[in-house]
Amino acid sequence: MSAIVVDASVVMKWYLPEIHSDAALRLLQSNYQYFAPDLLFAELGNVIWKKVRRGELAEKDGERIAVDLVEVSVDSVPARALVRDAFPLAVATGQTLYDSLYLALAVRLNTSLVTADERLWKGIENSPALMDHVKLLQKFA
């Protein structure tokens, strides 16, 4: 089983119908071991909260998804263990430290970060050594 890093933009699509959810579900059904910084769970919780607050998601559905997230098949790595590697990546690429935590984990595991975040993917384009570690969901799955 191969390791792969997934970010919140991918994992959220496992729970909510969004653009490219079909690709995210194909990825979920593939034979990978999924990893992410533990920041993933705070990011997902915040996305759910925003959708409930905007009226895009019923509160009871948001609560159900929040409970389901506890069981998601993603192994988490403490962000604390990744900051030292993530900070120089953030500075070099102009990406947020949050996004760079995912990237640092992919580099550490010598695998790919799969993201649906086109801004992140385009932001790495000028870093050829890092491009091997970032895959756009809609092109990956």
Image: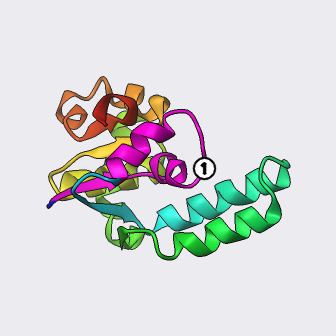
> At 78% across and 67% down in the image, what residue appears?
60
Residue 87 seen anywhere in this rendered image of the structure: no
Above or below: residue 126 compared with residue 68 = above
Foreground: 26 or 37? 26
Label 1, on which residue?
Answer: 16
Above or below: residue 113 compared with residue 46 = above
> At 52% across and 76% down in the image, what residue appears?
70
Give the residue type at disc 1.
Leu
At which x and y percent is residue 75? 34, 71
Side (left or right) of 33 relative to 36: left
Which quarter of the rendering shows the C terminus? Answer: top left
Above or below: residue 135 compared with residue 79 = above
Which quarter of the rendering shows the N terminus? Answer: bottom left
At which x and y percent is residue 15? 56, 55
Side (left or right) of 97 relative to 131: right
At which x and y percent is residue 69? 54, 69
Q: Secondary structure at mark 1?
A: loop
Magenta-span inclusion, residue 17: yes
* Region rendered in magenta: 2-28
Binning the other alpha carbons within 10 Å of mark 1 as few (below 14), some (14 to 19) or many (20 upward) gives: few
Q: Quadrant of residue 73?
A: bottom left
Side (left or right) of 84 relative to 2: right
Residue 72 seen anywhere in this rendered image of the structure: yes
Magenta-span inclusion, residue 69: no
At which x and y percent is residue 43? 57, 59
Q: Quadrant of residue 36?
A: bottom left
> At 84% across and 48% down in the image, what residue appears?
54
> At 58% across and 59% down in the image, what residue appears?
44
